[in-house]
Image: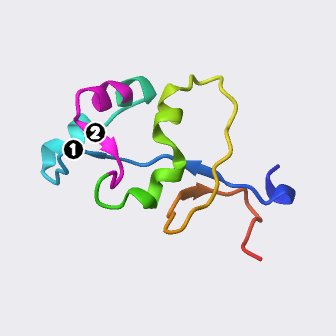
Amino acid sequence: GICHRKRALIVPAFAQHPYRTDEGAFLNLPRNKENLLQLLASDDMTSFEEFENPSGHGPTNFRRWTSLDASAAPYSVDWELRFEPYVVLEKGVHRS
């Protein structure tokens, strides 16, 4: 597991574009990566805070993530100033 290696899975974050809060907005959420890529191509989705806070999720490298297929191995991401990743940790992993 990742416990002994002190690694985390960084989850790419996306948002509807333009940002919507109406009830119908939830009907157009992607169900899988293929659907997400279609919504990105049509500008109905964007990487999270791509323009408002590019440092917040920029190191995730959205372009690289979107180009990978499901069988691709995870890739390394380096922390940068103001990076605010969404992460998944293995149970038992904590900051030290």
Circle 2 Cα neighbour tier, 10 Å, few/some/many (<14 / 14–19 / ≥20): many
Helix, strand or loop status at disc 1: loop
- In contact (CB < 8 Å): disc 2 and disc 1: yes
User: Which residue corresponds to mark 1?
Assistant: 17
Residue nearest the viewer, comparing 88 with 50: 50
Q: Where is residue 48 in the image (x, y as percent from the top left)?
A: 36, 51
The residue range painted magenta reads 37-50
- Residue 41 located within the stretch drawn in magenta: yes
Q: Give the quarter of the figure containing the C terminus.
A: bottom right
Q: Say above or below: 88 vs 41.
A: below
Q: Which residue lies at the image location 17% right of the left edge and 46% below the top edge?
A: 18
Q: Earlier in the sequence, mark 2 or mark 1?
A: 1
Circle 1 Cα neighbour tier, 10 Å, few/some/many (<14 / 14–19 / ≥20): some
Q: Where is residue 16 in the image (x, y as percent from the top left)?
A: 25, 44
Left or right: residue 19 compared with residue 57: left
User: Which residue corresponds to mark 2?
Assistant: 45
Tally the marks: 2
Q: Say above or below: 21 vs 44.
A: below
Disc 2 marks a residue whose amino acid type is Met
Q: Distance between the residues labelled 2 and 1?
A: 5 Å
Which colouring convention does the figure follow? rainbow
- Residue 71 located within the stretch drawn in magenta: no
Left or right: residue 55 compared with residue 76: left
Left or right: residue 35 compared with residue 12: left
Helix, strand or loop status at disc 2: strand
